[in-house]
Amino acid sequence: MATDTQLDSWEVFMQSRAGANFIHQGSIHASDKKMALQNARDTYSRRGEGTSIWVVPTHEIAASDPDDAGMFFDPSNDKIYRMPTFYTMPEGAKNI
Amino acid sequence: MDNVQNTMSKEEALLAKFEEKTAAGEAIEPRDWMPEAYRKHLIRQMSQHAHSEVIGMQPEGNWVTRAPSLRAKQILLAKIQDEGGHGLYLYSAAETLGITRDEMIAQLHSGKAKYSNIFNYPTLNWADIGAIGWLVDGAAIVNQVSLQRTSYAPYSRAMVRICKEESFHQRQGYEIMAIMMRGTAEQREMAQDAMNRWWWPSLMMFGPHDTDSPHSADAFKWKIKRHTNDELRQKFIDKTVQQAEVIELTIPDPDLKWNESKQCYDYGKINWEEFYRVINGHGPCNKQRMDHHIRVHKEGAWVREAAEAYKSKQKNKSINLN
């Protein structure tokens, strides 16, 4: 007898309405893309929660290491001039 | 010797950091470091929770073909599909801890993993479907609302999703009971009979009293659990008594009484001997539930094999094309 399998794992991303971001929902099991989309729909959108779905094989996801978060995100922490509040606007200027 | 001390202190530092995070109410994600005991506790609790959702489809499935109207049948089918979906959310969330779904199912079949005791009771008449939705799902909701704030993020996310869907389950059950209580004397009797049989097992769903609960200390320290079994049980009783009164069902507990000073209900003694007897395999339906799951799992093997065969065939095709 062939070894039992629960098929491959896929990550599910769903868009709740046209124009919105695709947001991670969780994962499902399926053996191919078509089954993955159908299982994702049946699992994560039984009440009209989605208008569009992406499925990605779980093993294809690259993720940053939470332990390295400090170092990894460091380049973005010291550039306060990227924030609009960094700048002093002349007194009286409007709509800026 | 130095090496041993180094790994010890490294482990201790990681544990200290972990406990600082959980104490501050921060969420733990799958790739974060976590103590083995935390991982083990979650795998046990989450797989048991997932198995409960799936086994819970059986007592309800018993009434699909005999639902009293097309409306009732459609609702019951939708509810059962939700339970399957809830099982899938939870299996997925548990898999992030490094256990595979095959392993979880094997543990269910070998008896190593448990499922909620309540599903070892039979559904004898249509009112039982009302009682399950209202009382069993009602009790589950109290527990799951509390678990929405559990420290393990994938578990918490699954709980948020489940809670959104459960209130339909509870309301449809209460509606069944309310309709039967407005019906004939015989229907009222059936509803009361279901109430009598499901009330105490529903209270047992929250687990042993806090003084006898074996898994609690670490679960609280690491914020897997936020409320004790007794706190949750009390919350369920306090909100359910009024609902029973509205539809004129009697709670089968002669000791149930409003306690003015504590502002909650006092209730009678729970029969823990029955609880442990059922947990240890001697409930009315333990064998039936497990035999059914094993049989269906085996009978469905060819579907999974066919899906795998189709996958490799498609793979070969695309290789040939290149």
Image: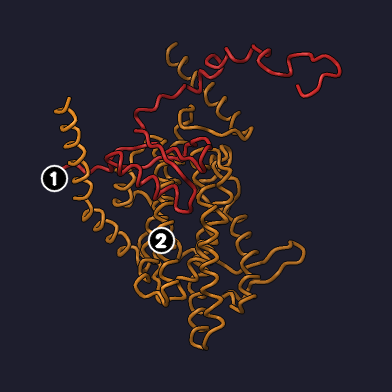
Chain colours: A red, B orange
Label 1 sits on residue: A1
Q: Can residue B103 be seen from the camera position used here?
A: no
| Residue type for callout 2 | Ile
SS for callout 2: helix
Q: Which quarter of the rendered picture does the C terminus of chain B lie within? A: top left
What's the chain of the residue with tag 2? B
Instruction: Give percent across and percent down for residue A6.
Output: 28, 43
Q: Residue at x 49, y 71 (%)?
A: B130
Which residue appears farthest toward the right when viewing the image?
A: A92
**Front residue (pair B182, B208):** B182
Circle 1 Cα neighbour tier, 10 Å, few/some/many (<14 / 14–19 / ≥20) = few
Q: Could you tell me which secondary element the residue under label 1 belongs to? A: loop
Residue B25 visible in the displayed image: yes
Residue at the far bottom in the pictured view: B185
Residue at (22, 53) in percent of width and height? B298
Q: Which residue is mark 2?
A: B80
| Tag of residue B268 | none
What is the x, y in percent for residue A79? 64, 12
Please, is residue B213 above or below residue B314 in the view?
below
Which residue sits at x=63%, y=60%?
B234
Quadrant for the N terminus of chain B in the image: top left
Give the image location of residue B147, x and y in percent: 55, 47
Residue type of the residue flagged with mark 1: Met
Instruction: Say whether residue B33 is left or right of residue B211.
Output: left
CA gap, disc 1 to disc 2?
32 Å
Which one is in front, B18 or B78? B78
Asked if both marks, 1 and 2, belong to the same chain, the answer given is: no
On screen, residue B308 above or below B254:
above
Task: Judge depth for marks 1 and 2 and give the one in front.
Answer: 2
Crowding near the residue tagged with mark 2, few <14, some 14–19, many ≥20 C-alpha atoms within 10 Å: many
Q: Chain of mark 1?
A: A
Identify which residue is drawn at 54% across, 14% down: A71
